[in-house]
Image (cartoon, rainbow, N blue to C red):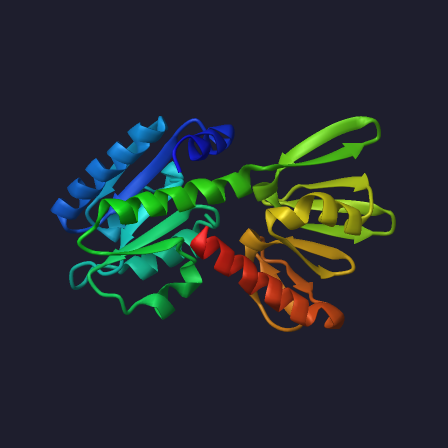
Amino acid sequence: MGIYSYFIYRKGATIVEIAICDDEKHICSELEVILEKILDKLGIKYKIDIYLSGEMLCNQMEAKYNLIFLDVKFVEGEISGVQVGRYIRDKLDMQLTSIVYMSWNEGYSKDLHRVRPIDFLIKPIKYSQVEYAVTTHLKLFKLWSDEFIYKIKSENRKVRMCEIVYIESENRKLILHLSNGKTEEFYGKLNEVFSQQLKKADFIHIHASYVVNYSHIVSFTSTKLTVTTGITLPISRCKKDEVEETYFAITRKQEVV
């Protein structure tokens, strides 16, 4: 871990914004101390906010946290951590925020699948658990912060990989569809940009005309998938098995990265 993680993270951000959300004050305090030790050791600037309910966190989410430690179950009558996670993903469309769930109970894996957490910590929280979760976030951030380089006429341009939802091929042109709703067009071959830049950044070639960013996939079937901008794209019949295998291979890789 150590120095390598520090430098790859600083390439994409100068500070990591962290939220801790748990109705047990001592858990929040213990986790805050552990995080401070880990991040100070790495030399990473950070800001940590603490919330004692899911509702409090949801009301303050305009802060756009990079990393959230979230209790699964709050006191009776409060919204659950699963509901908070779905609010973050579905309502706020914060697809690249890393969520780490915490619980005294191990039996929540199916409920949490849709929220795509990067880790699940069993209480009482241990230093090694938190260190692993932070390391996972830093490594994933490296994947999301890499840049895609392309050329329009004689001008070289670049965009962060995490901002690309999908790339479309139309005649001799490629169209970048970005998370802010904008598009960019340039000349090129989809197979070439996929093999040279996108494949290693966890994009999936789903069709002769489409390459999709794994991090922006919301759901998929054997014939189509939906991305975070709400667009549905076709999966070609000849790529059906390949798409499924690649998707779950990336999922497994990111779970143990």
Picture quarter with the N terminus: top left
- Give residue 150's position: percent from left, percent from top: 74, 35
**Picture layout, residue 82 above or below residue 135:** below
Q: Quadrant of residue 41?
A: top left
Q: Is residue 42 left or right of residue 215?
A: left
Q: Residue at x 74, y 73 (%)?
A: 237
Q: Is residue 180 visible?
A: no
Residue 75 vs residue 5, the one in the foreground: 5
Asked whether, in this view, residue 223 is left or right of residue 52, the answer is right
Residue 109: percent from the left, percent from the top?
Answer: 35, 67
Residue situated in front as seen by the camera: 229 or 27 = 27
At x 26%, y 51%, the residue is 55
The quadrant in which residue 164 appears is top right
**Residue shown at the point (37%, 63%) measured from the top left:** 112
Name the foreground residue: 129 vs 70: 129
Task: Count the labels in the image.
Answer: 0
Residue at the location (87% across, 51% down)? 171
- Residue 59 is situated, as x and y percent measured from the top left of the image, at 30, 45
Q: Residue furthest left?
A: 26
Tell me if I can see residue 70 in this picture.
yes
Taking 244 as reference, is 78 left or right?
Answer: left
**Quadrant position of residue 241:** bottom right
**Farthest residue, direction right:** 172
